[in-house]
């Protein structure tokens, strides 16, 4: 029997799972090592988070933390990655973590079953090199934005509804934050969601493909500047990328007021 053991960081000669990535000039041997040393929090294990987590695990990101408080329902199966009918009723975070470990046993996967709120968000992001947004609501994203700007942790915003999605990398101190572009959350009744507008199951994967690519670039120190807000309608085939800049009077990254983290109704 040949030796098929994998080293803790996938470095065995027998384990060439990252060969295609190392062969990419933009990643290379040193970039792959950086990914293997990186720690990423995936916030939410829905359509966005599960697809993102799968790509991170396959890419060899060394530590992946998942957080989600929900259980898997039948309506999730249309778009969720990594889970099936046998997982109905299970906690999304633990089912997703298990699936990631089956995909890549050389990385460390942890999960926490908790709703992200003002009381725990700073602890959850502590030690992460990057956060990927897999939330399904705006208040959580504004809370995450406050925490990430306050603690200078990069994150990648992503959102989908109907046939459209948006993505924006947020690098505190270097580019705009969520509130630079959208100073306040839109009123709930005006926000399109999968629940009120439906969702084609191809758009989360398309948006996550961009989100994870941006995340890899952030981890490698190669984030595109200036940051662009990408809006993609996969049904119409329309794509816009609008350069985004910091709002001088942004209450969050400009004035250092973390209203969603420290007070109000977030
Ligand atoms: Zn800002």
Image (spheres, grey):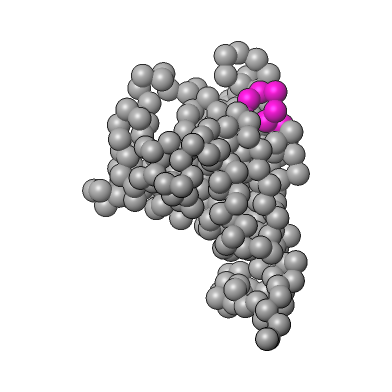
Q: Is residue 26 above or below residue 193?
A: below
Across and down, in percent, residue 90 comes to: 53, 39
Q: Which residues are magenta?
A: 116-122
Q: Which residue is at the front of the view, 240 or 216?
A: 216
Displayed quadrant of residue 16: bottom right
**Is residue 138 shown left or right of residue 146?**
left
Q: Is residue 10 above or below residue 88?
A: below
Q: Which residue is at the front of the view, 258 or 206?
A: 206
| Residue plotted at (67% across, 30% down) | 121
Residue 48 shows up from this direction: no
Across and down, in percent, residue 72 comes to: 47, 38
Q: Which residue is at the front of the view, 166 or 251?
A: 166
Residue 184 shows up from this direction: yes
Q: Which residue is at the front of the view, 77 or 202?
A: 77
Q: Quadrant of the C terminus?
A: top right
Across and down, in percent, residue 217 comes to: 59, 58
Q: Residue furthest bottom?
A: 1
| Residue plotted at (74% across, 39% down) | 126
**Is residue 84 shown left or right of residue 238?**
right
Q: How many marks?
A: 0
**Is residue 83 shown left or right of residue 128?**
left
Q: Residue furthest top?
A: 264
| Residue plotted at (53% across, 55% down) | 54
Q: Quadrant of the N terminus?
A: bottom right
Predominant secondary structure, magenta span = loop
Across and down, in percent, residue 104 comes to: 62, 63
| Residue plotted at (70% across, 73% down) | 6
Displayed quadrant of residue 63: bottom right
Magenta stretch: includes residue 151: no
């Amino acid at each position: 029997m040949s030796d098929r053991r994998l080293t803790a960081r996938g470095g065995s000669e027998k384990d060439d799972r990252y060969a295609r990535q190392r062969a990419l000039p933009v990643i290379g041997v040193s970039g792959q090592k950086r990914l293997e040393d990186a720690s990423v929090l995936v916030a939410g294990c829905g359509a966005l988070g599960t697809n993102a987590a799968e790509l991170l695990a396959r890419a060899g990101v060394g530590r992946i933390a998942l957080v989600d408080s929900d259980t898997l329902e039948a309506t999730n199966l249309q778009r969720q990655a990594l889970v099936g009918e046998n997982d109905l009723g299970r906690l999304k975070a633990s089912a997703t973590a298990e699936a990631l470990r089956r995909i890549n046993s050389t990385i460390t996967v942890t999960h926490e079953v908790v709703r992200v709120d003002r009381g725990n968000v700073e602890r959850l992001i502590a030690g992460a090199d990057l956060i990927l947004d897999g939330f399904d609501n705006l208040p959580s994203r504004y809370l995450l934005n406050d925490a990430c700007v306050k603690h200078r942790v990069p994150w990648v915003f992503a959102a989908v509804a109907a046939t459209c999605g948006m993505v924006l990398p947020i690098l505190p101190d270097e580019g705009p934050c969520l509130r630079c572009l959208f100073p306040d959350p839109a009123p709930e009744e005006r926000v399109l969601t999968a629940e009120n507008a439906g969702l084609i199951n191809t758009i989360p994967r398309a948006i996550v493909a961009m989100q994870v690519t941006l995340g890899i670039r952030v981890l490698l120190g190669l984030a595109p500047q200036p940051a662009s807000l990408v809006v993609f309608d996969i049904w119409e085939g329309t794509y816009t990328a609008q350069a985004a800049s910091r709002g001088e009077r942004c209450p969050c990254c400009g004035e250092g007021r973390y209203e969603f983290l420290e007070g109000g109704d977030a």
